Every structure is written in C-alpha cells, then in structure tokens.
C-alpha cells in the first residue's frame, strides 16, 4: 500500500516517487477510484494529485477490487 496526499488545495501536484515498495512494471490502482491506475516505470511511481486530493495505491487485482 502507498498513501499519497497533499495540502495544496489549488492546482496540481505531480511527483515521481522512487522506492515506493512496488516492483518495476507493476500496476497499482487508487482504492477510491479503481480506474485510476498507474504503472511503476524506471523504478518510480508516478503520482498525480489535484486540489488537496488523497490517494491510496494498492496492486491491481488485490482484494480491494
């Protein structure tokens, strides 16, 4: 599980997070919106947050879905 959050209420935050605990190429999805999925690339988890959004990523196909 990876939790991403921001307190920036206006605008967008984009980060490439290294060492997320997920494997290269692994697809992870936001438990709040199961279609919001990203893949780990070059060892980084791409995270996009908008307007104070919070996301919790788990591996696609896990028991959350």
Image: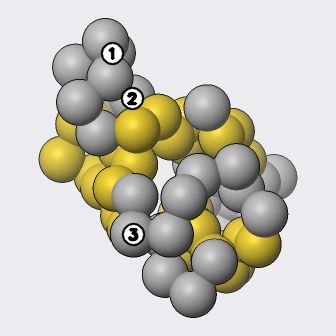
Residue 31: assigned label: 2
Identify the secondary structure beneath mark 1. loop
Which of the two labelled residues, at mark 1 and mark 2, occupies the earlier sequence position? Answer: 2
Task: Name the residue: 23% across, 30% down.
Answer: 61
| Foreground disc of the pair 1, 2 | 1
Query: For this rendering, which residue is in front, 17 or 61?
Result: 61
Task: Name the residue: 33% across, 15% down.
Answer: 64
Left or right of residue 61: residue 14: right
For label 2, count other residues whose C-alpha is less than 10 Å away and answer few (under 14), some (14-19) or many (20+): some
Q: Position of residue 17 (x, y in %)?
A: 73, 71
| Foreground disc of the pair 2, 3 | 3
Q: Position of residue 39 (x, y in %)?
A: 38, 67
Residue that extends furthest to the top in the rendered view of this protein: 63
Left or right of residue 16: residue 36: left
Q: Which residue is mark 3?
A: 25
Task: Name the residue: 71% across, 56% down.
Answer: 20
Q: Which residue is mark 1?
A: 64
- Where is the N terminus found, in terms of image quarters? top right
Q: Position of residue 6 (x, y in %)?
A: 76, 54
Residue 30 can be seen in this image? no
Query: For this rendering, which residue is in front, 41 or 14?
Result: 41
Mark 1–mark 3 distance (CA, rounded to whole Å): 20 Å
């Amino acid at each position: 599980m990876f939790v991403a959050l921001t307190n920036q209420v206006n605008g967008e935050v984009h980060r490439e997070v290294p060492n997320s605990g997920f494997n290269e190429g692994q697809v992870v999805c936001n438990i709040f919106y199961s279609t919001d999925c990203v893949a780990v690339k070059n060892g980084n988890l791409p995270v996009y947050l908008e307007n104070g959004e919070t996301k919790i990523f788990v591996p696609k196909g896990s028991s959350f879905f």
